[in-house]
Amino acid sequence: MTPFELLQPHTVGEALACLGEGARPFAGGTALMLMMKAGVLRPARLVSLHRLNLAGVQLNPDGGLRVGAMTSLSALERSPEVRKGWPVIARTLRTLSNVRVRNVATVGGALAHADPHMDLPPLLSALGAQVKIAGKGGERSLPVEDLYAGYLENTLKDGELITHLDVPPLGKRGAAYLKCTTRSADDWPAVGVAVVLSDETRIFISAATDRPVRIADESALAGLKIEGDLHGSADYKRQLLRVYLRRAIDEARSAVH
Amino acid sequence: MKRAAQSTETPQVGRSVPRLESWLKVTGRAEYVHNLRLPGMLYGKIFRSTVAHGRIKRVDVAAAQALAGVYRVITSKDIRELIPEPYYGPAFHDQPILAIDKVRYVGEPVAVVLASDPHVAEEAVHLITAEYEDLPAVYDEVEAMTSKAIVHDILKPAGTFPDLKHLGGRKNTNIALDFHLRRGNAAEAMQSADRVFEHRFRTQQVMHTPLEPLVSVAESTENSLTIHTASQSPSFVRIEIARLLGWPENRVRVRVPFLGGGFGAKLYIKLEALVSVLSLITKKSVKLSLTMEEQFFTITKHASTFRIKSGVSKDGRIVARECEVWWNGGAYADIGPRVTQKSGFTAPGPYDIEHVAVDSYALYTNLPPAGALRGFGIPQLVWAYEGHTDLMARELGIDPIEFRRQNLLRDGRPQATGTVMKDAAIEKVLDRLEALMDWKSPLKNTSKTLKKGRGIAIGFKACVSPTTSLAAININADGSCIVYCSTADMGQGSDTAMAQIAGEVLHMAAESITVVHSDTDVTPYDMATLGSRSLFHMGNAVKLAAEDAVRKLNQLRSELQLPADCPIPDIFKKKYGMQAGNVAGAGSYIPTYKSPDANGLTDNATPFWMVGGTGVEVEVDTETGKVCVTRMVNVADVGTPINPKIVETQISGAAIMQLGFTLHEKMEFDAQGQLRNASFAEYKIPGFLDLPASIVNEAVVAEQKSGPFGGKGVGESGTFGVSPAIANAIHDAVGVRLTALPLKAEDIWEKLK
C-alpha cells in the first residue's frame, strides 16, 4: 500500500470539495482497503465520510424507508423498522458476508461498489428503491437499478456521493432474495435472485451477470449473457438461476409479514 | 491465572485438563513470531517468478534499489558469495534459497527487497523486472512420468534422514523417488480371481491455510545466528542452517514460540534459510512474514492419481491388489519422497490381501512444491481405496460394511509390508461406525428434490519411522517442575499433554508444570512435530525423563537417609542447607525399525498404527447437485486418550479440515501454471455454516502398549475417511460416482442431467 492523505470533512459540501483527481471516498473501507492492499487502487487521497452525519434509519412520511448512506449493514439488519416493514432486507443481510464486515461496511458503499456478486443491489432494485446523490451541481435521485453500468462500474459521475437510500413501502407484497454459493457457504454467490410479487412482478438476477439485470420471467434466462468462472460454467449458472428463480417465487408467495 | 496445587494423587492421564496456554491466548499475551519486532529490524518482501519454467536472462533491481527507503535488494548472486551452493531440503538439496539460473514454478522467490518499512519494501518489489527464456513445462503428475520437460537437470539427494538414505532420483526424468512393493504374485492371482475391478481416482492440489502465515526473524553476529521462527521442526532447521553455513550447530539458535496452526506447512525448512542469509549479509535483524496469498506459493498438498485394481473371489474375498500412485510434488521435493514411500506401503488399505503390488512415484512438476499436510499422503490413498471398496461391494451386491469386515486386516496378521499388525483397532473402529451410524435403519426421502444417502470409509496409517525425541525435566528446589522439549505447540495441545504425562509420573498436577518451548540452545533434539508422532515419541521421552528424575530423587532420599515419602523441597533443604539446587532428568526415545528390502518388505515398518473412519449422511439436491452433509460420525483408534477433550477436538478438527478438501478447496491453475485463486476470496475453506448439523466423535476403547500410558497420536486420524465416505454417500443418494476431488455440485448435476 502506498502512502495517502486522509481527509475527514464535516459536511457533504466539504466532502464534495475534497473529491477530485486521485481522491476516493472512504466509507466502510471493507472493499477499498482490499483493493488498495492488492495495489489495484492507489489513491493519493481518501475522503472519509464518517463525520457527515449520514448514518441512520427512519421512516418517511409516506411509510417508506430512508437509510443514510453511512448506515452500517448491521445497523440496517437490526433496525426494528426494517424488520417490521421489509423483513426480506433483514433476512438477506444475515448471510451477507460476515458480522465483522457488516459491522463496518456501509449501505452507500455496498451500493456504489458495483460488484455484481453483492446481495443488496438486486434486492433493492427489485424493491424499487432509489438513491439520493449529491454532486457539485446539486442533488439528484436515481433508481438503484440504474446505478450500474457493468462489472465494478457505477453510473455516478466523478465527484458524486450517494447520501441516502429510499425504499418504498413493501406493504403486503411477497418478496424474497435467494443466492447460491457453489463452494463454501460464505463464498461470493454464483447466482442471486430477488423477487417482489405484485401486479407488476419485479425480478432481478445478479452474480451470474456483470450487473443486476431485470427479467420478466424464467423464459428470459435462455437469452442472457452469462460468463463461466471459478463458481461454475455458464450452463450450470443458467440452471441455478432457473432453480433459484422458481424457489424465490415460491418463497415470496409464502412470505408472511 | 491461579496456579493449581502442585502435589497430587489425582491421575493426570485421562483427565480433560484445559489447555495450559488458553488463558494466554484469549488475553492476547501468547508469544508469536508475528508480533516480534527487534531494534533496527529490516522487513523483506519477495519478488517472485511469473513463469512456470524458464531460464533467467536478466533481473533488473536498479529501480527498486533506487526507491527512497529501500535498504538493499538481494538476489542469488549475493547469496552465493556467502554460500556457494545455497540449496536446501529434507530429501533432496534441490531448492535454491533464491532462484539460480532457472525458475521452476510461478511464485518462486527470485529476489528480496529489504527496508525498515514493509510498505516501502513491497512497493519496491513492484519495480523489479525480470526476463525469462520460457522452457517447456509439465504440470500433470502422470504426464511428468514421460514428459520431455525436465524440471531438474541434476538431482542432489540430501542423505539427512535414515529412512531416506536410499534416495537417488532418476537422472533425466522427473522421478524423485519410485517405491515398489511386491508381496506374493498379484498379476497371477489377478488372473485366477473370479472378478477383477479397476478404478482410477484423483485428488487436487490444496493448501494448509494456517491462519498465522509463515514467518521468521533472524538476528546475527559475525559468528552466531538466532532464528525466531514459526517452525514445526526447530532441530532440523538448526542442522540445515549449520550445514549451509558450514558452522557447528552450537552457533545456530532456533527459537519457536507458539504457532498459529501448522498442519505440515511449517515443516523442515521454509523461510529460515532465506532470512538467515539476509541477516548475515546485511548484519541486521531481518523479518520475513508471508501474506496468506504467498503461502500458496510456498508449500501445498500433493495432487495425486491412483490406479487401483483388485481381484476378488466368488465369496467376496479380495485376493490380489495392484496399486499405482503418482504424486505431484511440484518443483521441489520437500518431503514428497517420504510421502511417496511411507504412504505408498499402505496403499492397499486396511485389508488382508495375500498378493499385493504397489508402485508409488514422487514426481517433479512446474507447480508450487508439495509436502506434508495432515495425513502425509494417507487421505489421498484412502480416497481411492475406499471409493474402490465401495464400488466393488455395490457390484458384488454385498453390504459395504460387511464386505469390509470380510476382508479386514486384523491384529496378528501381516500388513502388505509383512509387518504384523499390533494394537490397531481396525475392526473396533468399523464396528463403532456401524453402530453410531445406525447403519441398518432405512433412510426416508421426504422431499422430491433432496435425496438422502449414507456412506462410510475407513483408513489407516503407519507412523513415520525411525525418528528420535529427547526430553529433559528439571525439578526445582521448591519441588516445582519444568519440562524441556522441542515439540511445537501449534494448537494441538502438546504442552498440555506433555505436562500431563510428566505429572502422572511425578504425581503433580499438569497445571502446575511449566513446559519450555523449543529453543535449540536449551531444549534437546526432536525430529519434528509431524505425522502424529509427538504424543508417542516425545510422550515416551518425557515419561522417561520424569522417571529418571524420580529415580534421582529417590537416590537422594536414600543417600540422605530420608523416608521414601519425604516431600521434594525437604530433600533439597537437607542436601544444600537451603532452598537450592535441582535435579535434572533426561529421556531419549527412538523405536526399533527395519528398512524395507528390495521388494519393499520389512517385519518392522512402524512403531504404531493409526486408524480412523468416518460415516456420513448427506442430502443431494437433484436440481443443483448441491451436497449437504447432515450428519458426520468420526471414529478413531488413538490408544488411551491422554486428554479426552483435546482428543475429541483433534478428531473433529481434522475431519472438518478434510471436509473442506472434499467439497470446496482446490488450487486452480491456468494453462501457463498461473494460480487463479491465491486468496481467501477465491479459495474457500469451510466456515461454521458449512459444518454438518450433527458431528459425533469417538475414540474407541484401545491401548497402544508401547505408547506413554497407552496413548498414541491423534492429529491426522480424523482426516482419513471423510472424502470417500462423502463420495460413497452421494453414490448411495443419487447413483452418481465422482472419482476426482473436490466433489463439485456442478459435476454431480452434469451426471444427473
Image (cartoon, rainbow, N blue to C red):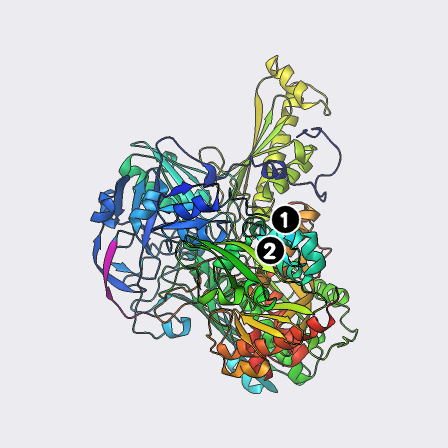
Give the quadrant of residue B328. bottom left
Q: Nearer the viewer, residue B354 or B265?
A: B265
Residue B97 position in % (x across, y down): 32, 50
Which comes sooner in the sequence, label 1 or label 2?
2
Q: Give the range drawn in magenta.
A: B129-137
Could you say where residue B623 lies in the image, as x and y percent from the top left?
63, 79
For marks 1 and 2, give the CA distance: 8 Å
Q: Name the kind of residue labelled 1 in the image.
A: Gly
- Structural crowding at the residue carrying mark 2, measured as other residues with C-alpha within 10 Å and reported as few (<14), some (14–19) or many (≥20): many
Q: Which mark is residue B707?
A: 1
Which x, y percent locates residue A216? 58, 79
Q: Residues within 10 Å of mark 1 (few under 14, many from 20)?
A: many
Can I make out residue B545 in this image? yes
Host chain of mark 2:
B
Left or right for A138, reference B9 = left
- State left or right for residue B26 relative to residue B162: right
Residue depicted at x 57% and y 54%: B607
Name the dominant secondary structure of the magenta segment: strand
Mark 1 and mark 2 residues within 8 Å of each other at the beta carbon: yes
Q: Which residue is under mark 2? A: B608
Is label 2 in a helix, a strand or a loop?
A: loop
In-image side of B666 versus A60 (left or right):
left
Q: Quadrant of residue B193?
A: bottom right
Decide which of B482, B96 is in the foreground and name it: B96
Q: Is residue B524 above or below residue B384?
A: above
* Chain of the residue on which disc 1 is drawn: B
Nearest to the observer: residue B135 or residue B80: B135
**Percent coordinates x, y for residue B126 in the rendering:** 30, 52
